[in-house]
Amino acid sequence: MDNAKEEMRRAAATADSPDAGEPHAIAAHLQGWCRACLHLAALAFLACAFVQTAGRARHDPWDLAFVVAAYASLAALFVVLRRAERLTPESPADDRRWLQRAAWTLSTVLSCLFAYRVARIMPAAMAVAVWAMTASVVVGGLYFLVLNDGDRGSEEDCHVADDGKLVFQKIPREEMV
């Protein structure tokens, strides 16, 4: 067991990480590599799915436009969400608000694109229901991501403590991400 730990420290000592030799640094480095591999795999899957779908839709310009618009919006949404993941509590509030608005806009575009495609093949009553659900999601997102600036309502956050009782605790604005 000690030999394995020592081997890990020696391997990490040769790495160019600032905390070389520390087990938590090795774990963090490995986690970063795994995350990068997962992102690349997701991107490769998305690219393959796009090529296949675009190939099937190449004879109908409207279907091809839908496929291109949907995949472009989805890729842009992934970029926005990745940037939002990298925000820290010290990040400027304007960046956070801009990313929230961009995420809402792209989500709205995707919701409307898919609602349009689904509503086209549904009976009229079901199409109305699809559009009503889409509108409720869009309006809810507009309120929570764009219009709600966080200063409305109670300044305290309610959560359940370890003993099961409700506890009210104010969370400073700079700690919210």
Image: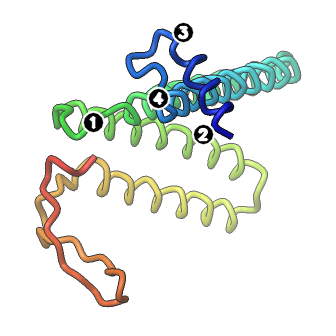
Give the amino acid at mark 4.
Glu
* Distance Cα–Cα, label 2 vs label 3: 51 Å
Question: Residue at the location (69% across, 65% down)?
Answer: 126
Front-most of 146 and 158?
A: 158
Give the amino acid at mark 2.
Leu
Give whichever of discs 1 and 2 has the lower sequence position. 1
Quick check: 164 above or below 16? below
Give the amino acid at mark 3.
Thr
Residue 113 got which mark?
A: 2
* Distance Cα–Cα, label 2 vs label 4: 49 Å
Q: Position of residue 141 (x, y in %)?
A: 38, 53
Please tell me how crowded label 4 is: few (under 14), some (14-19), or many (20+) other residues with Cα within 10 Å: some
Say what secondary structure mark 1 lies in. Answer: loop
Contact between marks 4 and 3 (CB within 8 A): the answer is: no
Q: Is residue 40 left or right of residue 152?
A: right
Say what secondary structure mark 3 lies in. Answer: helix
- The residue indicated by pointer 3 is 14
Give whichever of discs 2 and 4 has the lower sequence position. 4
Q: Is residue 58 left or right of residue 19?
A: right
- The residue indicated by pointer 4 is 22
Q: Position of residue 30 (x, y in %)?
A: 59, 28
